[in-house]
Amino acid sequence: MVRISDETRRNNERAIRQVMEQLLAGGVPPGGKCDIKTLATQAGVTRTGFYPKKNRDGSPRPGPYQHLAEEFERRLARTARGRRHERPTSRPGRTPQESGAGLRDRLAERHEQLAELGEFKQRALSQIAAQQMEIQRLREALTAPSNLRALPRAQRGSAPFGSCS
């Protein structure tokens, strides 16, 4: 287990608090969320420091930054209540209607993909059925009396007729 110095811990706490303020103010990076993972990533610390640890004897102890995680969650809950239960997003000013429109577009694309895959499946099944019918027809033609004759099968280990060997 690696121990960090008190100075490093203070610097990390300062960085975490700075990023916490940015996230709570709505400055979420693209592709990120307003959560502990983004907080840790942006502050340059590992996420494990925000969660409780266990001593060697199995007793619990707080993580080095657990108090900051609890403060972040409390402030986030307070902020969410003030903003009508909306967490800050990476796209400020986006209304629920705009979000819903984007979801409807994605849903329409998925339905279109499913329809295309359904058509592909139907074509594949039709081709398999046609191939199966052709195989059955050829087998019946082979067993039906006609002028076709089956060639004798070569025995293993013997050379074929007219071989140069």
Image (tube, rainbow, N blue to C red):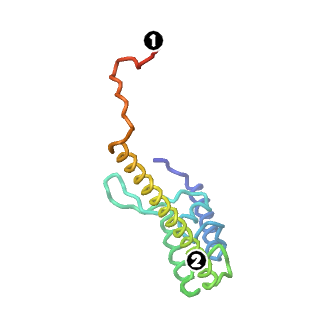
Q: From the top left corner, tell me how far across and down residue 92 is, in percent.
A: 67, 78
Between 20 and 12, the one nearer to me in the picture: 20
Q: Residue at x 54, y 86 (%)?
A: 81
| 12 up-or-down from 161: above or below | below
Q: Residue furthest front?
A: 147
Q: Residue furthest top?
A: 165
Quadrant assignment, res 101:
bottom right
Q: Crowdedness of circle 1 by 10 Å Cα count: few (<14), some, many (20+)?
A: few
Locate residue 145 relative to residue 77 in the image: left or right: left
Local SS, label 1: loop
Amino acid at dot 2: Leu
| 15 up-or-down from 149: above or below | below
Cα–Cα gap, marks 2 and 1: 72 Å
Q: Earlier in the sequence, mark 2 or mark 1?
A: 2
Q: Identify the residue position indicated by label 2 in the image.
A: 103
Q: From the top left corner, tell me how far across and down residue 164 is, in percent.
A: 47, 13
Residue 120: mark in rendering: none
Q: From the top left corner, tell me how far across and down residue 86 is, in percent.
A: 57, 82
Local SS, label 2: helix
